[in-house]
Image (tube, rainbow, N blue to C red):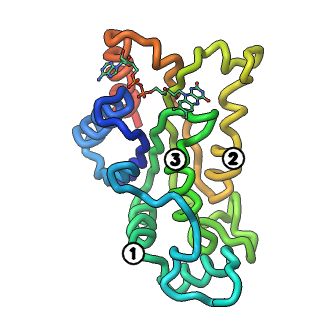
Amino acid sequence: MNILYIYAHPEPASFNAALKATALETLDRSGHEVKVSDLYVMHFKPVLDASDFLQRKKKDILNLFPEQINASKTGTFVPEIIEEMEKVKWADLLIFQFPIYFTGMPAIMKGWIDRIFAAGFAFDPITQGVYDKGLLKGKKVMMTITTGADESLYSNSGAHGDINDLLKYITHCIFEFTGLEVLPSYIMFAVNSQSREAGKQRLEIYGEILKDL
Ligand SMILES: Cc1cc2nc3c(=O)[nH]c(=O)nc-3n(C[C@H](O)[C@H](O)[C@H](O)COP(=O)(O)OP(=O)(O)OC[C@H]3O[C@@H](n4cnc5c(N)ncnc54)[C@H](O)[C@@H]3O)c2cc1C
């Protein structure tokens, strides 16, 4: 399988970095082809703006959907976007790995979505090319997430609420919206307070989960 691993953590000595290393090693050993988008290492620009377009359809006012649709048709996104879109086209499975920030993705990863899951490329707002007609249909996606909070806080009766419900704005409104088939998220709770030993066990479990993809 062709797998695109999209990763966001700023620290190479973090637990997240160890998870990523485990994933890449396991996937490679299982015979998968893997490409990585390590967003902090790439200094990925997370802001969708006029500089995304080499050519503008309308120069007097910036209207993002028409510009994205035009750039998708004419191949006139800046090269860093084209490169990421080529990786998405190539992939059968996208894996997003990140530490949870305010119960969402770090801004750098959300910005990757804003710019790469562009209108005309990932969905089509004109022809209603969304959900079962989303332009990424046929591909799968999963998330690997670490939290600081304990699992009880992210339960139905906890202060935050059920984490899978809270993440629906990603799994449903981004992933399913663009036609992706969503695999269960792998969530590791209370990572800040785990011991190194517990961390090692979690790395092993993560490796086992990815072996069974
Ligand atoms: C802006 C911001 C917003 C946040 N919002 C939320 C939120 O809404 N909800 C929430 O729950 N959390 C939140 N957090 C917390 C955040 O999600 C956690 O800090 C993060 O998930 C921890 O992952 P890490 O990789 O940075 O852990 P690390 O700090 O790198 O590691 C944690 C522990 O894992 C062990 N470990 C580290 N490396 C290894 C290794 N190689 N092998 C084995 N064990 C190891 C160590 O015992 C270490 O102490 C937020 C944090 C920030 C900065």
Which numbered disc flags the more N-terminal residue, 2 or 3? 3
Instruction: Return the residue at label 2.
Output: 172
Q: Which residue is rendered at x = 31% and y = 16% of the image?
A: 200
From the viewer's perspective, tell me whether residue 68 is left or right of residue 29. Answer: right
Distance between mark 3 and mark 1 Cα atoms: 24 Å
Rendered location of residue 32, percent (x, y): 29, 47
Whether residue 1 is visible:
no
Residue 209 against residue 68 in the figure, above or below: above
Which residue shows up at 51% across the image and 49% down it? 109
Q: Looking at the picture, which amino acid does disc 1 mark?
A: Pro
Mark 1 lies on residue:
79
Q: Residues within 10 Å of mark 2 (few under 14, many from 20)?
A: some
What element does badge 1 sit on? helix
| Ligand 1: quadrant of the figure | top left
Secondary structure of the residue carrying tag 2 is helix
Location of mark 3 (residue): 141
The one nearer the camera, 170 or 106, is 106
Instruction: Name the residue type under label 3.
Output: Val
Q: At x 42% / y 48%, what residue is drawn?
A: 6
Give x and y (percent) for residue 102.
63, 34
Depth check, mark 2 against mark 1: the one in front is: 1
Q: Relative to 97, say whether 34 is above or below.
A: below
